[in-house]
Amino acid sequence: MTAGIEIGMDGAGLPVRIDIEELLATRLLVQGNSGSGKSHLLRRLLEESASLVQQVVIDPEGDFVTLADAFGHLVIDAGDYNEREIARMGARVREHRASIVLTLESLELEAQMSCAAAFLSALFDAPRDHWYPALVVVDEAQMFAPAAAGDVSDAVRRTSLAAMTNLMCRGRKRGLAGVIATQRLAKLAKNVAAEASNFLMGRTFLDIDMARAADLLGMERRQAEQIRDLERGRFLALGPAICRRPVAVKIGAVRTSTRMGTHSLLPMPVSEPDNMRTMLFAEMEPDAPPPRSEPRPAPVAADDLIRQLAAADGVDSAHPREDAAQVDPQATEGVVVDVLEAMLADPDSAFQPAALLYQDFTVRCRMHRLTRPPLDLAAFRRRFAMAQAGMLDPADSRWAESLALADRLPEEMLAPFLLLARAAMDGEPCPDDDALGRAYATSSPGRVRRMVEYMEKQGVVVARTDFGGRRSIGIPGLGLSTTAE
């Protein structure tokens, strides 16, 4: 299964797609000089994938705050909060899977680096149960992962660089997919850039940047000249999530824009020189106050913003969303059953961690046009275990006693116990060690044996092996037993 988006068109007019699932595992590096269309490319990527995956945008210039109007991203103005509050918000963003834009435009460079480092570290340090898939887009990445010391203190530079390195080097196992964009490859730390496997290279003019771009694209140095000739909005693409050979891509249109829009020429004002002089040197009131900048809106308190993050994970009881009221429970349950059946058809799914399985589940649900996951992680674990035993309908009354007995066991033993219960209810032979091992997510016969022994100690099952070596397992709470085999 793939979840792809169209990023633009190649020279032949054919669509060029990005596989979001592959991107989550392989990360992306975007490079382009100012005016090359780099921000336009990021906006296209964010807009097209907004319904497929959680998005976290580190925005040093406030370019992406308009995503909030069209796609519901929560905007966090970093200038209104301290470092501890920013870290708390980072943890809540992972817990509640909120798509956010962290705008740093009101901060100086050193404060931007410190804030971004605290936020990224909170994302990285989230508990294992919150390792949901997320695109982490960092614009102007050379600011946060500089290749050399600059005007900021060494302590701030090291902290920021460490956070960016964790994102790109170790973030994949935590569900974090780094998408970093830079104007100058030569200014970006090499160990951060080297972790990306997908590249979109835009126009650049300096030889050192063209040489690094050519190396990343696997091109010869003499071929690098074409990077200098790229038009605005055109990029050379390469990577497992895009294409296996470099291809020129013209980025498609976007639905949102920056708050300032694009700059274009305006007619000059028509005024006589004398009138202009009069306006510029008009007598001023001696005690006139200096002009004031446009007042900023009152900042949202940190606790209030954290409650908004939590609300993004569910429906606000005071203001229910329109789409939530229109969800058909029967249709949603049908999608859940179909998705679970498709996941169980993959023989490797039984051995995947619960967090990774849940990532797959949410993506599949979104491909069925469910905008929000119908189950949280805890509910998914239980439904997946039930589905492994063949119990796809949770309302089936014949499973009620078995589920009540399973409450005595740890959660990871639910699937193998229900598998035994099903065999007993159907009068079938006892499942073998391979079947129980798949349900228990292990290939070790010893672990399967110890699991059955634990169930016996809890009084949930009774195991019996006859002289012929045939095993049967009884379930006293049901008054039933599997047949011997």
Image (cartoon, helix red, strand yellow):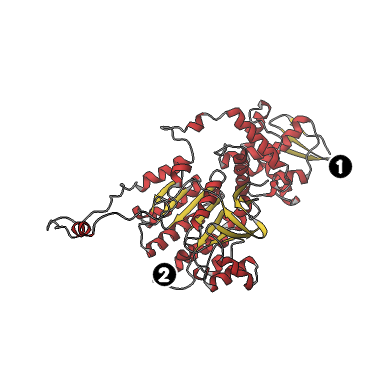
For this orientation, the residue located farthest to the front is 272
> Which residue does the image show at 24% across and 54% down from the upper left?
292
In which image quadrant can residue 277 be found?
Answer: bottom left
Residue 96 is left or right of residue 109, and the answer is: right
Tell me if I can see residue 459 in this picture. no
Image position, residue 123 (x, y; %): 49, 54
Mark 2 or mark 1, which is nearer the start of the sequence? Answer: 2
Label 2, residues with CA under 10 Å away: few <14, some 14-19, many ≥20: few
Q: In what element is the residue under mark 2?
A: helix
Q: Position of residue 99 (x, y in %)?
A: 49, 47
Residue 132 in the image: state x and y as whole percent.
56, 49
Task: Locate the N terminus by quadrant.
Answer: top right
Residue 174 tag number? none
Examine the rendering and report whether any part of residue 453 can be seen: yes
Amino acid type, label 1:
Phe
Real-space Cα separation, disc 1 to disc 2, in angstroms: 71 Å
Instruction: Residue lying at the far right in this picture: please name it.
Output: 468
Q: Is mark 1 on a helix, strand or loop?
A: loop
Q: Eyeballing the image, is 329 above or below 242?
A: above
What residue sits right under mark 1 in the picture? 467
For the point 41% across and 32% down, the residue is 318
- Toward the viewer: 74 or 66? 66
Q: Which amino acid does label 2 sit on?
A: Ala
Which residue is depicted at the point 66% across and 49% down? 352
Q: Name the residue under label 2.
A: 155
